[in-house]
Image (tube, grey):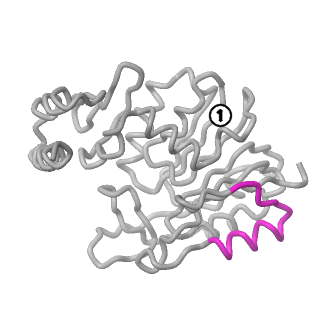
């Protein structure tokens, strides 16, 4: 009953965007989370973490605490299985809010976030600004990664964090420039991790990295059911492509449908 009451109140307060009452609700239900409106954005924070959103609907990701959200995400993308070092290049394709940057508290990395949603890119920039101890350098690229460099139509779904190239009949469409990863980076750039969550276009992202694959040590990819209205996964084509290009499947998360590959040539 308590969870039902909390959920009902949360739904209406988010809909009404009443921040003070949201904080009161979190206090009464002993949630280690508070929120503050800052211009067009919302700062969500606890004693240990701060993170910017621009849509209150995304609060649901953090209701069980920042630690729970981050540990789950880091585990799903196998970050704890990779030995990172200072100066490593990390590519975050489908960066959402830039959350994987929070893993690198004790390291200095070079962070590259690719995200097709302009509003999410603004959030990533702000989250990077409050995590300056986590990186040596960073770049936020507001373009979709694909296997072509051309004008493409994307469908904005920021409320659920899954902006995609696949039409759904109700999302706002936008014509943008796509980019190939192997055109953005030089072929001799050593990349420790390429993380891919491309909402069903993971294979196309990999094809666009074709001339860079030999320089990528680890690839963590979400190959779940995100195509054809969430009925088709992308594992078969992703797996076949990576195995044929010298990568070994090292680990998998069957709940999230994420897979970790390691380059056998590095």
Residue in the image at 38% along x and 27% along y: 50
Residue 250 image position (x, y, % from top left): 76, 55
Residue extending farthest to the front is: 1
Residue in the image at 60% along x and 66% along y: 202
Identify the image quadrant of residue 28. top left
Q: Nearer the viewer, residue 64 or 174?
A: 64
In the depicted structure, whether residue 240 falls above or below residue 20: below
Rate crowding at label 1 as few (under 14), some (14 to 19) or many (20 or more) other CA atoms within 10 Å: some
Residue 140 image position (x, y, % from top left): 52, 43
In the depicted structure, whether residue 107 falls above or below residue 191: above
Identify the image quadrant of residue 83. top right
Q: Secondary structure at mark 1?
A: strand
Which residue in the protein does label 1 denote?
A: 110
In the depicted structure, whether residue 70 falls above or below residue 194: above
Q: Nearer the viewer, residue 153 or 57?
A: 57
Residue in the image at 56% along x and 20% along y: 133
**What segment carries the magenta color?**
235-251
Indicate yes or no whether the magenta region holds residue 236.
yes
Left or right: 126 as drawn, with respect to 170: right
Left or right: 144 as drawn, with respect to 7: right
Left or right: 10 as drawn, with respect to 230: left
Indicate yes or no whether the magenta region holds residue 121.
no
């Amino acid at each position: 009953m308590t969870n039902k009451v909390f959920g009902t109140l949360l739904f209406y307060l988010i809909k009404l965007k009443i921040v003070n009452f949201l904080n009161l609700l979190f206090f009464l239900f002993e949630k280690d989370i508070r929120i503050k409106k800052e211009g067009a954005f919302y700062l969500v924070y606890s004693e240990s973490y701060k993170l910017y959103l621009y849509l209150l609907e995304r609060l649901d990701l953090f209701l069980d605490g920042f630690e729970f959200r981050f540990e789950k995400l880091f585990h799903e993308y196998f970050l704890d299985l990779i030995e990172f070092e200072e100066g490593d290049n990390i590519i975050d394709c489908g960066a959402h809010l830039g959350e994987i940057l929070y893993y690198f508290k004790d390291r200095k990395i070079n962070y590259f976030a690719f995200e097709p949603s302009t509003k999410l890119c603004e959030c990533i920039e702000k989250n990077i600004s409050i995590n300056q101890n986590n990186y040596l350098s960073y770049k936020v690229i507001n373009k979709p990664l694909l296997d072509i460099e051309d004008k493409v139509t994307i469908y904005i779904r920021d409320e659920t964090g899954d902006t995609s190239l696949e039409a759904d009949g109700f999302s706002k469409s936008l014509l943008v420039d796509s980019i190939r990863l192997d055109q953005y980076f030089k072929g001799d750039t050593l990349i420790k991790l390429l993380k891919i969550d491309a909402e069903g276009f993971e294979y196309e992202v990999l094809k666009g990295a074709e001339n860079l694959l030999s320089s990528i040590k680890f690839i963590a990819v979400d190959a779940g059911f995100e195509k054809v209205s969430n009925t088709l996964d992308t594992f078969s084509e992703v797996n076949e492509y990576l195995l044929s290009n010298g990568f070994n499947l090292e680990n998998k998360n069957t709940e999230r449908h994420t897979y970790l590959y390691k380059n056998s040539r590095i």
